Image (tube, grey):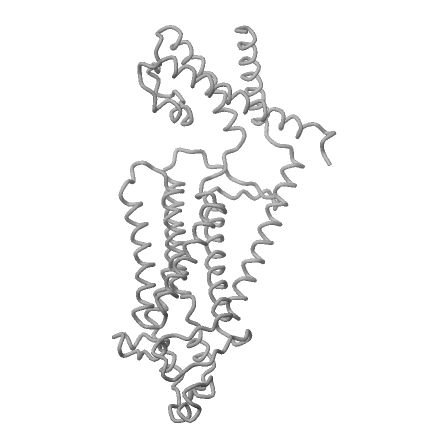
Amino acid sequence: MAVDETNRKDGIETFIVNQTREDDGGEDTEKKARKNSLVLATFLLELIILVFMVVLEYFLRWTTLFPIVRLSFSCNDPLISVRSAESGFSTFIYEGSVPHATIYALSFCVPPFVVLVGEIGVWAFTDERQKPIWLSCNGMKVPQVVRRLIRFTGVFVFGAFTVMVFADVTKLLTGRLRPVFLELCRVNHTLCDAQGGQGSDELCTETDEMMLRYARTSFPSMYSALSAYSAVFLAIYLHGALRTRSVRIIRPFLSLAFVMLALLCGLLEYGLRVCHWDDVVVGLAMGVAVGVYFGSAILHNFREHVPEKIVLSLLHRFLLDNQILEALIKESGQLKLPENKDLYIPRAHMRRTSGLEDDDTKQRARMYDHFQRDLSTTVDHFRERRNSQMDPTTQL
């Protein structure tokens, strides 16, 4: 059994070394050209989708192309009878450029700037190897920092317009009246009294169609959703892409600052009485949900994909370290690590053994054997998958 286990280890080690050498040889020209063509086609398709979302949002928000639900209202309804002067911010209602311009600037300008600074810092100060990508257009090479900037910024812009489209479509389908609706539509109280206090747009003396659409689009708060999405996106980026241990206060400070700005934006909407409190809550929840989805599911916390060559190299190094650890366990009877700064200890092994007592050496060795067996099984599965991909009979 010991001889079989030794042969098994040697076979796994030889397989990993051979696969690493094969990967070091590089890909053939035809396969690389086909891969680059797929990258370019995907980029163009995603660019078309992004342009479509921008155009759609333009027609939803700044034109009257799409109809809106027009609910009837009561001239004596207290929920829509709030006056802007009561909020103390009457100069900011609808025509005010300060809050709207500030929200758009913070939502669309600050995140790309933070990503730009962060990626330049990662490119300049990281010790990891920067992997460029080759394109088939005259052998042009795109650095990794440029590729990451395009990816992160593009995904952020697409997510921002996705939030805006969702919010505006919901506004058009619900048509909920704002708390300052009667003031914005400048209701004719004489005609309203003549109709028994009930009516629709015929009771409004305001002729601006965009103003009336704005007065009927309270749910949900689009600015709250947009600011919440930007804050969550930046928070995930700061904690996912910038993983240096020397920055322990800057990352949480910036993340909490962006989150507080998003909350203040929602409170400002409610304080101006342009939205109901539940409109703000739903808008914030929508922005947080989309931000978490794009940051975690789409960009995988902004972490770079690890090539198979690096994974095989780490497995090879891990197997060598396993032999050293086993020798120490057998000789000394307790788990002691050699004084080697370059020793690679997998986190899964540390998680499995960190909760055990130091004197329970048998239990430690048993857990260590289980982990080694799981690793061997994983390598076998990887080898079978690799062989199936290399077998020409399995290709379609």
The answer to whether residue 66 of the structure is visible from this angle is yes
Nearest to the observer: residue 33 or residue 104: 104
**Residue most extreme to the front:** 196
Left or right side of 379 for 285: left
**Residue drawn at 36 percent across, 60 percent down:** 106
**Residue drawn at 59 percent across, 30 percent down:** 26
Q: Is residue 60 above or below residue 343?
A: below
Q: Is residue 206 above or below residue 340?
A: below
Left or right side of 17 for 96: left
Q: Position of residue 17 (x, y in %)?
A: 55, 19
Q: Is residue 134 above or below residue 258?
A: above
For the N terminus, the quadrant is: top right
**Residue drawn at 65 percent across, 41 percent down:** 34
Q: Position of residue 217 (x, y in %)?
A: 44, 72
For the C terminus, the quadrant is: top right
**Residue drawn at 46 percent across, 58 percent down:** 160
Q: Position of residue 117 (x, y in %)?
A: 37, 48
Q: Is residue 316 above or below residue 98?
A: above
Nearest to the observer: residue 295 or residue 377: 377
The answer to whether residue 321 of the structure is visible from this angle is no
Total numbered badges shown on the rendered structure: 0
Nearest to the observer: residue 311 or residue 21: 311
Q: Position of residue 75 (x, y in %)?
A: 38, 84
- Answer with the quarter of the image where residue 386 lies: top right
Left or right side of 332 for 141: right
